[in-house]
Amino acid sequence: MCSCELHYCRRKSDVRYLMPVLVQSSLLPHLQGFLLVVICLGSYFGSSENRPFPDITDEKFINDCVRIHNDNRSSVNPPASNMLYMTWDEGLAITAKAWARHCVFEHNIYLRDVRRVHPVFSSVGENIWAGAPPSTFSVMKAMRLWVNEDQYYKYESNVCQQGKMCGHYTQVVWATSYKVGCAVQICPNGIDKTTFSGQIGAIFVCNYATAGNMNGLLPYQTGTACSACEGTNNQCQAKLCRDLKRDQLKSYSWTPDWDPVRATRDPSLATEDPNLTTCGSSCIAILALRAISTRSMRLPHLQGFLLVVICLGSYFGSSENSPFPDITDEKFINDCVRIHNDNRSSVNPPASNMLYMTWDEGLAITARAWARHCVFEHNIYLRDVRRVHPVFSSVGENIWAGAPPSTFSVMKAMRLWVNEDQYYKYESNVCQQGKMCGHYTQ
């Protein structure tokens, strides 16, 4: 079946699954096959509560988050001499989105285990805002609450007024925090640990690197703007130390192992990004947001707009149209590992130091991401290992391609690789001229 994950529906009760829909329908008379229609109903879709929030790839959202952070960093009082210019980090935004999906108003419990919250940075900070209804959210409103804590903070003594909070403000203006990634999430079932937990709400999370709020330290040094910038590549921009090389640092696009979508595949938690919709290899995914007359659908009791996601398979029963196993499929994983180890244990001449091979989820995520490019060439990012894996210092790769899709099996693909052994001479470590041996030796 074609699985389409959405986050546009206001409540779980607003979702209706209809399958199959007769192709004779006046709405789609030219389509053949089965249709999976997911309809999200909004009585008044024009209201801000019902609009989907921006995804972490939304350019305006990113610009707002970065700009408002830097505006506040450049206007601290007393003025800062070493405040770094802040730029966006995709890895931090992924972390923020994954935690926001938990819909709980508390700090990420995985922050203490930094490798589980970011593949590169050694420390990560965090600010959280929550509100209800969702229309109360904007980046400016959320950050204003954080920054307004400055009235309770005394820089000279590095003390917060008793009974007040200052940590959100000091994280925003922490001089050495130079990367930020934020995410906003709508919570149809409410936000735990708030006074409005029974209402639909929104939660906004920002993660920072390196982390601020180190015990006993001031958030920044005072003095003339940019007079204490470290390094030789800094330019003074809006009273902030900006290093273009530092700006260009990008982290690995990854998925935390505690992300609810990854753990449960719950459609109500999925991202707004329609590209993450998962369909079979021959399934066409169409995302259309339009005003559709409810009369044409013969659903007179429904009001408002319909968000329709249609996954089409003209011959869904054929092997070509069956979805391939996911990287979490147990049989697929077992086949890949078993066939690799079978071939590793049967090399000739025999090996004395051959390691047993096991599955690595991070490598599988990398493989899946590159496979989606649908190009028969090696991953162009392999030379920049931090972009292909968060831990390993080097990553190898084998690729197979074939058509139609029914020609694929793990065994068939790997047989082509392993059959290269006939061209490889172990004694001289040489491959026969004009032949390939690299798949086998890998």
Image: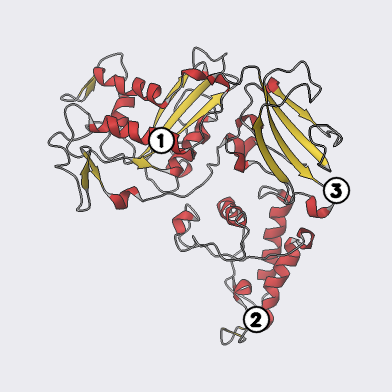
At 44% from the left and 55% from the top, the residue drawn is 386
Q: Gap between marks 3 and 1, in whole Å?
A: 45 Å
* Viewer-nearest of discs 3 and 1: 3
Asked if residue 276 is positioned above or below residue 364 in the image, the reply reads: above
Report the side of 319 relative to 111 (left or right): right
* Residue 180 place in picture, x, y as percent: 38, 38
Mark 3, secondary structure of its residue? loop
**Classed neighbour count for the residue bearing mark 1: other residues with Cα under 10 Å, few (<14), some (14–19), many (≥20):** many
Q: Amino acid at mark 1?
A: Asn
Identify the residue position indicated by label 2 in the image.
349
Residue 62 position in % (x across, y down)? 42, 37
Q: Residue 327 vs residue 187: left or right? A: right
Do tag 3 and tag 1 residues touch (Cβ < 8 Å)? Answer: no
Q: Position of residue 392 (x, y in %)?
A: 48, 57
Query: Circle 2 sits in a helix, a strand or a loop, which is it?
Result: loop
Q: Which mark is residue 317?
A: 3
Residue tagged by mark 1? 207
**Residue 36 versus residue 230: which sits nearer the camera?**
36
Residue at 44%, 30% (x, y): give it. Answer: 205
Going from N to C along the chain, the mark reached first, 2 or 3, is 3
- Residue 100 location in percent, x, y? 51, 30
